Amino acid sequence: MRILVLGGDGYLGWPTAMYLSQRGHEVGVVDNFIRRTWDHELGAESLVPIASLQERVAVWEAVTGKRIEIHIGDLNDYTFFEPVVRDFKPEAIVHYGEQRSAPYSMINRRHAVFTQVNNIAGTLNVAYAIADHVPDCHLVKLGTMGEYGTPNIDIEEGYITIEYKGRTDTLPYPKQPGSFYHLSKVHDSHNLMFCCKIWGLRATDLNQGVVYGVDTDEIKFDERLRTRFDYDGVFGTVLNRFLVQAVAGMPLTVYGKGGQTRGFLDIRDTLACVELAILNPPARGEFRVFNQFTEQFSVMDLALAVQETARECGLEVTINNLPNPRVESEQHYYNAINTSLLKLGLQPRYLNDTLLESVIHVVQQHKNRVNDTLILPGVNWRQTVNG
Amino acid sequence: MRILVLGGDGYLGWPTAMYLSQRGHEVGVVDNFIRRTWDHELGAESLVPIASLQERVAVWEAVTGKRIEIHIGDLNDYTFFEPVVRDFKPEAIVHYGEQRSAPYSMINRRHAVFTQVNNIAGTLNVAYAIADHVPDCHLVKLGTMGEYGTPNIDIEEGYITIEYKGRTDTLPYPKQPGSFYHLSKVHDSHNLMFCCKIWGLRATDLNQGVVYGVDTDEIKFDERLRTRFDYDGVFGTVLNRFLVQAVAGMPLTVYGKGGQTRGFLDIRDTLACVELAILNPPARGEFRVFNQFTEQFSVMDLALAVQETARECGLEVTINNLPNPRVESEQHYYNAINTSLLKLGLQPRYLNDTLLESVIHVVQQHKNRVNDTLILPGVNWRQTVNG
């Protein structure tokens, strides 16, 4: 299949591009390198050294004989993006091309506005390009489990059937996102549901949990194919950050009580889920939502798991409960449904010691690159700062 | 009270500014005149001639002795807007400052992106300015009943208590908006709910129905205080448009079957509702939602009412069912709750012959200004066009 991967230079985008290429699809990648620019802004960088996108695709071709097309530009520039879609004629588009950090969106007003405008307008451009040029194309859009917040009822996959005062309807699941970033994904979801309705587009919204891990089968072909690995307070997600803290001999920083429960998944399952969605497209006009995670953990569960595995690797690790920089419940009900992808055949790779140890080994190889001034949370949800 | 009216040069903004000024509040108006620019873009203009904002406030002062401050600029320009809020120190902000036409937002990609970016980023700037400078200020934000769509269950005021699988929670009411404009208001609602939660702002979201009417008590002081009256296919709302068609001797254009049911209210009730909200602010941290309409009608109900009243005025009027340019249900359940404003003391002015006749008389005075090429719908929801 002809597949365009938007944000194909990122943590998940690049492994997805290789995975789909390796499985025989014809893959094009779109990226504007803004993720690398944010590294400059924050004075941060991937713990694992990463090659340029141009080198990545060259190595990929040398190793596998398969070509990945690259298109450098911004989704928000329709004069760039429209011809890419028109000429590549994708049958599926995997859309990772958004600002994806909650803390980044909360730095100040400029970052909040940037995040929402970038994500919403970029995604509108994607929908218009499909409607204009490839209306049969299946849009596989990365959303987030964080769109739902932590309601006191079960979290269904995108829709909920409500019985109310003797009447019934199936409606979009109510959303309670917890940052301007998460809000941008909720806005995207509403916009895309509408585009499917009025233009007959087909889309799958993958409400993804927190991804962990550093290796995929394709990355193992060559060190120069490595994807980025973030551990800083802005872009580092919780489990990856804990593993770096463990190796660096720092306390694991749990925000508040650590009872915050979320869905999680292995990076390799992300790739499998994306391909399952592509191979099983929805009907024209359908806006389909899958909850894409394999297990639920509390933040404290993860800290304890990392502590134990680190100990088995000879690392003594303490846990430090920081004041929570976010506004969120620290003890709450959480039960999210995730059966759709399992029904399509997903074979989950559950979190285990072997995975944790393998990440620890990769982190240990690059321990000298850890910048410990970047790990503590520097962005506070409760106060605005100039900008 | 010190009250800033955003979009204070518009159809509702200007009458609101006068109404609040007349009732003893200290009023400032913010506007960037983009509504007048859209007239140039569309080759349209208000049926009723309107004065410049500068002339309006001069006449207002001459007639009443009361001053209304004006600030000319764009909410999206924070270097303009921040000092206005910082220096005016409003105790309440009434926010009409958005692109408010569904057809305008559906013209093409550029208009969709413009509408969402303008409305969302502008409203984020309003929230940040309040948080930065006047955190106690009450934001009274105009939303729309169109945020809800037409669910098969009763429409509550912003929130719904859901019993589900033996558990219960009160959650944001699920939204199914029907245009990129309506979507922008849903996005605003989610953003503002979050701002109230994290910063302790106080806001009232007025989910307003379709407004009709041309006169308010203050407008009657002087012809030069008139507010705009739109009847074109892009900015004209349904009842006002029907009244112009009746006077111009054109068939009333009902989209599709005309079973679309919506909430409606008199322009004078809009002003009363806004002041009731201001005088009864929510607590800090509360995001309060009122459904602001007084009656429900189907489009065909209104066409028949206009036809009958017109006949009494000696005008023979036919009704024409056009193919619906929108994607919407034309026969559906509709029952929306609107008790909150009634409880605060709203005395509704229900639609009656006297009101319809008085609008017909105003329209007749300006009949020679009707441009009948502008009335039929020119924007189609189902197809994208270049732009």
Image (spheres, coloured by chain):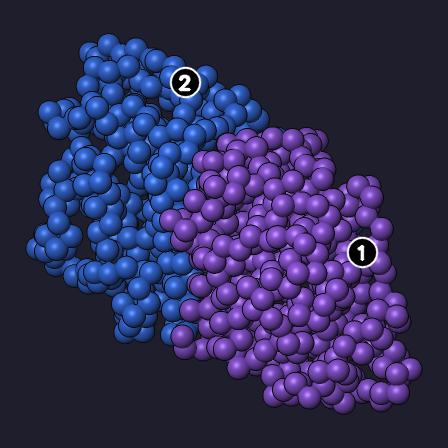
Chain colours: A blue, B purple
| The C terminus of chain B sits in image quarter | bottom left
Instruction: Give me the chain letter of mark 1.
Output: B
Is residue B224 toward the left or the right of residue B318 in the image? left
- Which of the 4 image quarters holds residue B150? bottom right
What residue do we see at 68% from left, 36% from top? B281
- Which of the 4 image quarters holds residue A112? top left
Residue B146 visible (yes or no) = no
For badge 2, the amino acid type reads: Pro
Instruction: Give me the chain letter of mark 2.
Output: A
Q: Is residue A227 above or below residue A351?
A: below
Q: What residue did someone put label 1 on?
A: B294
Label 2 SS: loop
| The N terminus of chain B sits in image quarter | top right
Q: CA distance from mark 2 to mark 1?
A: 47 Å
Q: Nearer the viewer, mark 2 or mark 1?
A: 1
Q: Is residue B36 above or below residue A251?
A: below
Q: Position of residue A242 (x, y in %)?
A: 29, 23
